[in-house]
Image: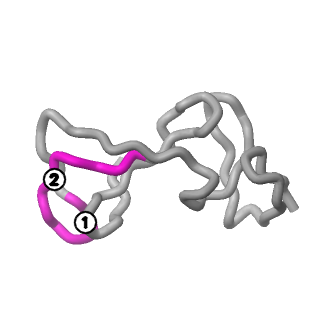
Amino acid sequence: MLICDTCGKTGDAESMMRCSGCKRIFHKNVKCVGVREIKLKEEKRCPMCGQKTKKLNERICPFCGEHLWSLHIDCGGIIT
């Protein structure tokens, strides 16, 4: 079991991730990972729904601000 540096609760390897920047461990959920909306200069196509978008929800490390992954705002598809 791993211990989340954000909330202090435990989790298994499937529910947790390690930041490549600061090496801290936290849950993949929104409560433990930082979120910010970003606006892109050019549209990107979502691989899940096929829609083009210029806005994404970016998941960031709550400790060092390192980019973890981005999500399409409408469908939640992962766009990196």
Image coordinates for residue 28, horizontal then vertical, percent: 60, 58
Residue closest to the eye, 77 or 56: 56
Q: Which residue is drawn at 29% across and 40% down?
A: 38
Image coordinates for residue 80, horizontal then vertical, percent: 36, 47
The first of marks 2 and 1 along the sequence is 2
Local crowd size for mark 1, using a 10 Å CA cut-off: few (<14), some (14–19), many (≥20)? few
Q: Residue most toward the right?
A: 1
Image coordinates for residue 75, horizontal then vertical, percent: 28, 69
Q: Residue at x 14, y 33 (%)?
A: 41
Q: Residue at x 60, y 57 (%)?
A: 31
Q: How far apart are marks 2 and 1 (CA)?
A: 9 Å
Helix, strand or loop at disc 2?
strand
For the N terminus, the image quarter is bottom right
Helix, strand or loop at disc 1?
loop
Image coordinates for residue 18, horizontal then vertical, percent: 68, 45
Q: Mark 1 points at which residue?
A: 74
Count of marks overlaid on the render: 2
Position of 11 with respect to 22 (left or right) is right
The color scheme shown is one colour
Position of 21 with respect to 51 (left or right) is right
What amino acid type is highlighted by mark number 2? Thr
Q: In the rendered image of this protein, does residue 11 appear above or below residue 4?
A: below
Quarter holding residue 73: bottom left
Residue range highlighted in magenta: 46-58
Q: Mark 2 points at which residue?
A: 53
Local crowd size for mark 2, using a 10 Å CA cut-off: few (<14), some (14–19), many (≥20)? some
Tag 2 near tag 1, CB within 8 Å: yes
Q: Which mark is residue 54?
A: none
What amino acid type is highlighted by mark number 1? Asp
Q: In the rendered image of this protein, does residue 16 appear above or below residue 39?
A: below
